[in-house]
Image (spheres, rainbow, N blue to C red):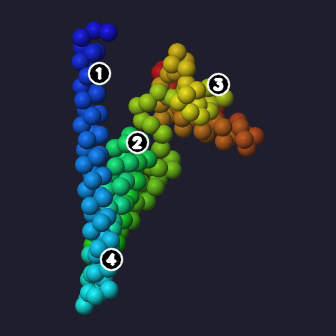
Amino acid sequence: MDFKEHLRHRIAYLASLIEIVLAAMVLFAVLLASWRLLVESFDLLSAPTATEGFTVFLGHAFNVIIGIEFIKMLAKHTPGATIEVLLFSLAREMVVEHTTPVENLIGIITIALLFVVRKYLFVPSFGAHVAYHEAGDPADSAAEIDPDEVRPVSLIRLLWEQRKNRSDEAGTDDAGSSLPPTAAAE
């Protein structure tokens, strides 16, 4: 291992440590906010304006939920965790804040786009190496991955194989060749 590669590994390690410390700080803040949320729930009983108090309570509850999802995102490093944080943030904005109908429409469209991304463009881990078997099934767990047989799998390849598998299940042959033209050059 040369000096540059060693330095890259050290920097990545330090960045991971900082990320862990940040996640621990956010966890501590979420615990404090959860305690405050519990106290606020009892204050709702004696609040003269229960509607305004409930709106504030709901905003704080969403903030705690977003904090928890943010910690998961820092811990998991998956696109799915990031999408969940974005979904909860948008939901909080739409539910708690009193927005205009146009802002609500934009929020609904954005949530719909996030669901489309999650449904059709979701890859378990972008940039990661996934074991790819001839049958087109990714390995079930990281423990089964042989480092010598691992190669990167592009989004185009995954979508093409999904389309091919669907046509094989339906008994049709509309998938054409086994690989798309752009994936053959990988």
Q: Work out whether 63 lies above or below 102.
A: above
**Residue at the disc numbered 4:** 41
Amino acid under disc 1: His
Give x and y (percent) for residue 142: 53, 30
Q: Which element carries disc 3, helix, strand or loop?
A: loop
**Residue found at the far top of this picture:** 2
Of callouts 4 and 2, the N-terminal one: 4
Give x and y (percent) for residue 123: 48, 40
- How far apart marks 1 and 2 lie (CA) works out to 19 Å
Q: Alpha-carbon neighbours of circle 4 within 10 Å: few (<14), some, or many (≥20)? A: some
Q: Nearer the viewer, residue 142 or 154?
A: 142
Q: Pointer 3 and pointer 2: residues touching (CB < 8 Å)?
A: no
Of callouts 4 and 1, the N-terminal one: 1
- How far apart marks 4 and 3 lie (CA) works out to 56 Å
- How far apart marks 1 and 3 lie (CA) works out to 33 Å
- In the visual, does 114 lie left or right of 47? right
Which callout, 4 or 2, points to the residue nearer the camera? 4
- How far apart marks 4 and 2 lie (CA) works out to 31 Å
Q: Which mark is residue 154?
A: none
Of callouts 1 and 2, the N-terminal one: 1
- The residue sitting at 62% across, 33% down in the picture is 137
**Residue at the disc numbered 1:** 9
Q: Nearer the viewer, residue 72 or 130?
A: 72
Is residue 96 visible in this depiction of the protein? no
Amino acid under disc 2: Lys
**Residue at the disc numbered 3:** 134
Which quarter of the rendering shows the N terminus? Answer: top left
Which callout, 4 or 3, points to the residue nearer the camera? 4
Q: Pointer 1 and pointer 2: residues touching (CB < 8 Å)?
A: no
Q: Work out whether 22 lies above or below 158.
A: below
Q: Alpha-carbon neighbours of circle 3 within 10 Å: few (<14), some, or many (≥20)? A: few
